[in-house]
Amino acid sequence: MDKLLDSDDEVMLRDAARGFLDENAPITAFRANRDAGRPFDPGLWAEMARMGWAGVLVPEESGGADMGHRAAGILSEEMGKTLAATPFISSAVIAATALRETGSDRLAEISGGDALYALAIDEHVKHAPTRTALEARQTGNAFRLSGRKCFVADGSTANRLLVLARTSGADGEDQGLTLFDIGADRAGLSRATANSIDARDFATLDFDNVDATGDDVVGDVDNGLAALAPALRTGQAALAAELGGLSSGIAAITLGYLKERKQFDRTIGSFQALQHRAAHLFAEIEVTASAIANAGRVLDADPETAQVAVSLAKARASQTAKLAVMEGVQMHGGIGMTDEYDAGFFMKRARVGTEWLGDYGHHAAIVAAARGV
Amino acid sequence: MDKLLDSDDEVMLRDAARGFLDENAPITAFRANRDAGRPFDPGLWAEMARMGWAGVLVPEESGGADMGHRAAGILSEEMGKTLAATPFISSAVIAATALRETGSDRLAEISGGDALYALAIDEHVKHAPTRTALEARQTGNAFRLSGRKCFVADGSTANRLLVLARTSGADGEDQGLTLFDIGADRAGLSRATANSIDARDFATLDFDNVDATGDDVVGDVDNGLAALAPALRTGQAALAAELGGLSSGIAAITLGYLKERKQFDRTIGSFQALQHRAAHLFAEIEVTASAIANAGRVLDADPETAQVAVSLAKARASQTAKLAVMEGVQMHGGIGMTDEYDAGFFMKRARVGTEWLGDYGHHAAIVAAARGV
Amino acid sequence: MSDNLESFRSDITAWIAGNLPSELQGIARNEETICWGGRNWRFASDAQRLWLEHCHAKGLTCPRWPTEYGGGGLSRDEEKIFREEMLNAGAPSPLESFGIWMLGPALLKFGTPEQKAEHLPDITAGRIRWCQGYSEPGAGSDLANVQTKAEDMGDHWRVNGQKIWTSYADKADKIFALVRTDRDAPKHLGISFMLIDMQTPGVSTKPIRLISGASPFCETFFDNVKVPKDGAIVGEQNRGWDVAKYLLTHEREMIGGGGGGLLSGSTLADMIGTMDADAAADPVIRAEAMELEVDAMAFALTMERYRDMAEAGQGVGHASAMLKYYGTELNKRRHEIIMSARGSDALDWDAGFAANWLRTKANSIEGGTSEVMLDIISKRVLDLPSK
Amino acid sequence: MSDNLESFRSDITAWIAGNLPSELQGIARNEETICWGGRNWRFASDAQRLWLEHCHAKGLTCPRWPTEYGGGGLSRDEEKIFREEMLNAGAPSPLESFGIWMLGPALLKFGTPEQKAEHLPDITAGRIRWCQGYSEPGAGSDLANVQTKAEDMGDHWRVNGQKIWTSYADKADKIFALVRTDRDAPKHLGISFMLIDMQTPGVSTKPIRLISGASPFCETFFDNVKVPKDGAIVGEQNRGWDVAKYLLTHEREMIGGGGGGLLSGSTLADMIGTMDADAAADPVIRAEAMELEVDAMAFALTMERYRDMAEAGQGVGHASAMLKYYGTELNKRRHEIIMSARGSDALDWDAGFAANWLRTKANSIEGGTSEVMLDIISKRVLDLPSK
């Protein structure tokens, strides 16, 4: 397996990404999107697609750059640092991985940045794929989908949907689930955009007898989790990387503040109690960075066995992001509480990122089970 | 209900207890007992009995001082500060409460300091009264006890035993338990003293057809938990108080060290990171002290409803003691790790006190259930 | 319990039952339902107005203040019974204000008879709404770093400068502010505690938008503001720091205990509501919730114990910093758990959880940061050395 | 993986299978089974002696040291494979010592050719057992506060003073110690890194009993000890602090990673064994165990990442303080959980859990306290200001 270091190619990719994002998607751009009520900037996404980011996991024969999961993680990490809001994880990571198995024609649209996917999976307040009740009634080659999906990231802006539906079995069972790939314009589908704290797009989707056919099925009927699992894993790993970048981002801003701000006639960064907390945060960020790099490495080398490595990264990244944003706001004092300052943006995105695709407890339980706890 | 303050009488009791313990049972006395392999000093206990401590919960008509649970807590707290090892909780608190209901003749022996009781209750590594399998086979008015009890505090030195045994029902059930009060010299009983980390007495007791009669039953046959519950509660409250005192004791020693010890040409107590940790420990100790005082107050006012207050105190005291001893050892550095220094004694007793009569999770679950969690 | 207190309890229970408008019973406490009073106050309902009038007539807006100023003259035990019965009856607080919480206690301790007579009745009646002007931009936790200056112009003070974190300054009628009246004195001297009408020319405010989306605080600007000297300063001139310190201690106890309805007995279960099965089964959420409830109950008892100590004349002093520290950190933990237990539901502003959660992050900053509280404990309570 | 490495793996696997005495296979690592070597070493068994001889003959007691000193001359990748296959084969370490961990690396970096030739072969063969003399009573974390003095007597140094926390000094043959050779120089200068034979007249030791009951450390006294000058000092005279700092960094990485068999893949479940039903059902124990396993796995990966970085020539430098800090705090948490999961069973010394638990409390003190590590990170890595 590769070392837990960025390779030369990866260093170049990271440097290029950082340079591009600092120029084209700094935090001020996120603020402008937020103020305009725009979950992401389509022009920026088109630019990223031109650079190959949308096709980072798409095979070259479908027009992709096929750079692998560690590369996807690096892009996600860098986007996390500046809070760049894009459909990257939903489309370029999750959908690309799900459709790659079947060699779907949509892959080219993904790498071109034109297909904007959303994954409609959860029906409860916690990530739980098996707790799917949304029904897909089958008649021959035809299906009719009815039910509700909540917390669908990019659900309002997507033009295509991956939908996990129940074709047999009961709510809570692993089997009997089927994954559909449908257009977001089908009759019977209505979408309600949430007023999300991170100013991005998530939505509740209502399916009222939405028609689908066997051609829309990804993988096998009744075995949808098998088709979805690799995609979910890559999404979780990329999200962990985003949270890792987010943690580094707010920590860097906070360190800068500690070195500048004076109080009681001293630089506040000279107070030992704050120094020790900053040092502890550094330690947590470093340890999490290892788990994130490892998840990408294992996904590239042996994706079928990667769930524990991915869950480790997502669990650690969620916990570290929570610490980083809490320390960030507290160490800034009053100014950290103002909307004018950026710290709050990190805090709100961290909360959303923690819940999406499984929270700390969800992923820690997977890790612990693998270790016999 | 009384205020959460020591009354004038309680202040006097505390001052007297502290004066007595500082003179007669300082930590050096504990060390001497430990070095001599003696779990407690019978002479000291006789002295305490003369002062009314052994009869703190015994009615005056049985020769007791009948000072109440808050008073018992104050004595226990002060003993905790100097690590005074005595049969106080087993005999003067638990046994006295259990036997008080039935007006047993043994109460006078308890208050005289002559009856040394031990409570034989647990059979597993965690406190769980209902998980009693030790069997008491009944024939008419006769019982034969067979089975094993572990972690019996004061089990080797006691001359009498309170034994919870199963007269009907299955392991794990609330009902079908019976409490016996028997001499520790009965045939068929063997006792193995553990090599306890706190240098006190706990033992494993094996019962091989030990005879008992209906006269030995405390309370009603098959309803032993009802007889035991008030006694367990008072024991838990007194143990919480001991742990509270222990926390204050090690914190005071640690603060003294922080004010004296110099390193890098400064008093180490001037380092802000240590100051903040010491201040946090102070806060935890103060908050725990409130829960301990409250448990005594509620036990005195309305013992039947006191379980939540008692569990709150035991949970908090266990957690605070853990923090206090860890900070105590760490802040002392190398010297805190040596047997020559006292910090380790506090750490080891805290661990035993945490497990005995229910650990943090056991009591926190009771509190949380009362709050709907 | 004495007979007097028992009869007080039955009287007050009957009085509440007879006076509380039924539509206010059990109403939730939030920005829409709190009654702040003041010159421009618009009552949310006739019921709200009536309830304030009834309570004020009986002195119950400020139960322990002297009756001559519109207070209730109750003892501490009576006040406790009153609050318990208000809770039992599901009665909302008739009036809340910084006048009640902060300025009133300061005037009762430091004010002249004339100042008390002028201001306290307006506070108990809810006629004047006050705000607090302590913090300044750039000073942060270093509250004594006051740059707003008041120059002695003979019959008036001329005030220039800027305050920040003035709660609801845009809605307040008057402000009590720390101003520097002697620029040559050491930092903690030369400060005075001054009362200024917000309608005076030269006073202006600008709301600060917070990360929670709300704007409860303002920046407040003083541009050549003329303040008539008579009655302008509370306590001695140049000794305003004494008044401020007294109030900070007072505020700490309040903030430490106030957050999140702890004292009203709210449990996490109340606040979380029906829990998703997966959230309920998560040992991490469960363990954190258990620990929170344990600590919250013990903290509530600590508030009670400290009140008992204060009442018994056992000085609490700097240890009140502990209440502020512990209570606010507890409240932050509480809302982290609530967010986690409500999962994705809580990520929508409209669900209401998130604004509360983000609001708690200021708890450990306002009124003295947790770091300042820990400094106070270590230096003033534990007497740890400075070198 | 290159073909060379694959063939190395099959060779080493076969070699282990052919040389490991069967009675050592899968033996637990503890005080009774570790082979420390030295002049007075008494092997626990013939098998232990044989295994040391076989490994030493193949250079595998110090796999990466040069072959001329009895090392194996392996590359980093080869060493990793060797360790993996040792683990797979259930083979114990043939030899452990402070010579291997500490002095050897110091000599390889700072030693003269003569010093290397004199000492390294004795270390790889297990003929000489070394101990470390850094700390002094009263100095604590302030390691540069060296009072033990070495006076220049022409052909020899005369050493007087006292060391503390010298691991197994009562069983060691020689000591590498920090001594002050220039009393007029600033604190960090004037220190030399000196090699002293423990059999020299005037050297004495006294074991220190720890809270765990064990006595792995000693006080070591130097009373007019004559140390011949030739080859006595490693590195430059008066620049011993450079050698010490280098070794401290080295030790930090070792202690951070070593504790509790983390790298050998031990899980909490392995260490706790069969769990009582009530302990297993406790959400608090369960949540703590889950969090520990998550952090332990991520930390093991961090050790790997830092090794990869060092190997790639990306300086790790002061960030190694993070490994020491995190690894030792993690190990303390681990043993708290084990104690809690084993409940009353663990409270008996004879069960063995308690001594391990108490031992871990020293992890965050020895080799630089956690507080010192956090200071290093904040000042040297994060570049936070000192005022």
Image (cartoon, coloured by chain):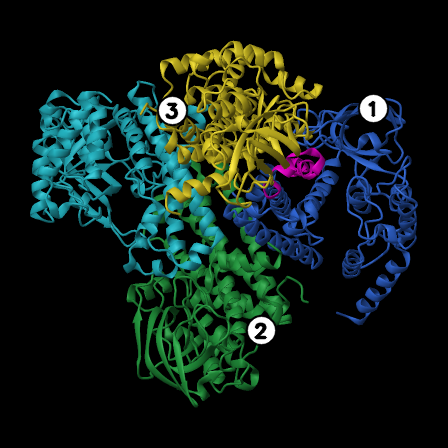
Chain colours: A yellow, B green, C blue, D cyan
Q: Where is residue B149 shown, x and y percent of the image? A: 37, 71
Residue C7 found in image quarter: bottom right
Vertical position of residue B77 compared to residue A127: above or below: below
> Does the magenta run of residues contain C361?
yes
Tell me if I can see residue D159 in this picture.
no
Q: Where is residue C139 shown, x and y percent of the image? A: 66, 27
Q: In the image as oriented, which residue stretches furthest toward the bottom?
A: B140
What secondary structure is marked by label 1? strand
Circle 2 marks a residue in which chain?
B
| Residue linked to disc 1 | C204
Q: Is D320 left or right of A154, judged from the image as shown? A: left
Circle 1 marks a residue in which chain?
C
| Residue linked to disc 2 | B68
Q: Is A237 left or right of C272, judged from the image as shown? A: left
Q: For the magenta stretch, what is the residue range?
A: C340-369
**Disc 3 with disc 2 on a shared chain:** no
Q: Quick one: B364 or B97, which is closer to the camera?
A: B364
User: Which amino acid lies under the numbered mark 2 shown in the image of this protein?
Assistant: Gly
Q: CA distance from mark 3 to mark 2?
A: 69 Å
* Circle nearer the viewer, 3 or 2: 3
What secondary structure is marked by label 2? loop
* Circle nearer the viewer, 1 or 3: 3
Residue A300 is marked as 3
Q: Is mark 3 in CB contact (under 8 Å) with mark 2? A: no
Other-residue count near label 1 (Cα within 10 Å), few / some / many at <14 / 14–19 / ≥20: some
Q: Is C197 left or right of A237, judged from the image as shown? A: right
